Image (tube, grey):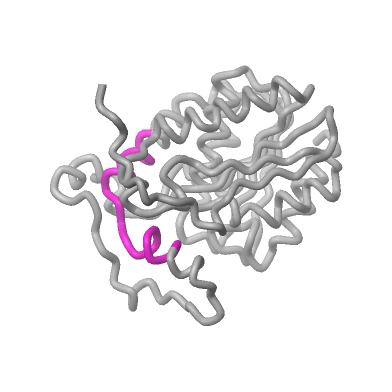
Amino acid sequence: MKDLNLNPDTQVNPIARERFYSGSKEDAVLVIHGFTGIPAEMEYLGKEINKKTGYTVYIPRLPGHGTNRQDFLTSGARDWLRKIYDSYLNLKADYKNVHLAGLSMGGLLALLTAARFNHSAKLILIAAALYANHPLLPYSHIIKFFKKEIKNDPEVLQLDEEGLTPEDKLYREHYWGYTFPVQGAELHKLMRLTRKKLPQISCNTLIIASKKDDTVPLKAAYTIKNNIKSKQKKLVILENSPHVINDGPEKDKCARIVTDFLLKTI
């Protein structure tokens, strides 16, 4: 057996630490961030859920995320999925009801967890990345043999770094400054697998999407709604949110929709 190829100086960026908000001993919500994301992008939603419902909220950090790009390059779909499976099972050991919520790739991981464990509590999908508006993603399984990482043009990204902390800048440098064909291929595997598993979903499901999401097309939300077997399913389409709906200009509305769903039956 070979040891993991992990730089001994690897550290978790302070802004990427996991979040845990203690609450009810009956209900917990597992909240899952997206591809190259960090728990911080789910923090506002997690706090609102905890405050408005009283439920315990756990936001894990996916392997390879929130450290450095070298670490990210060693991670893949099995690592990310296993982390969420374990997190779900750990919560199930302590709480009667464990609800699932995920953003983008986190939505895929939530769907796969629900399918794997015959999930009967509630499922919340925010801009779930069943499809993506990236022309090279379907070819990433080929590109990965030629390029492990591709440096992005900062001018094309148009990142506004005014007011950012050193930790924010470091995170952006490592994860937003590059395209990762190997991990893109892993994400594409998750997309294809999730599409196959949709008919296995039967729990109460909330799907949130946005017309201004440039990353995930509305087709993804409609495909989920039309293929899951849930008797109670609700699709909400927002007007003005970018891809990270739960941390954008309509984050209050998103949080309200989510907490209402958790507290009520559709």
Name the residue furthest front: 8
Q: Quadrant of residue 113?
A: top right
Residue 248 found in image quarter: bottom right
Name the one closer to the observer, 69 or 113. Answer: 69
The answer to whether residue 180 is magenta is yes
Residue in the image at 53% along x and 52% along y? 38
At x 60% / y 36%, what residue is drawn? 225
Up the image or down, 123 lies above or below 116; here it is below
Instruction: Specify the segment rendered in magenta.
Output: 171-189
Magenta: main secondary structure equals helix
Residue farthest along the left direction in this orientation? 146
Q: Is residue 220 visible?
A: no
**Which of the image's four quarters has the N terminus?**
top left
As for residue 258 lying within the magenta part, the answer is: no
Q: Is residue 197 above or below residue 66?
A: above
Q: Nearer the viewer, residue 262 or 219?
A: 262
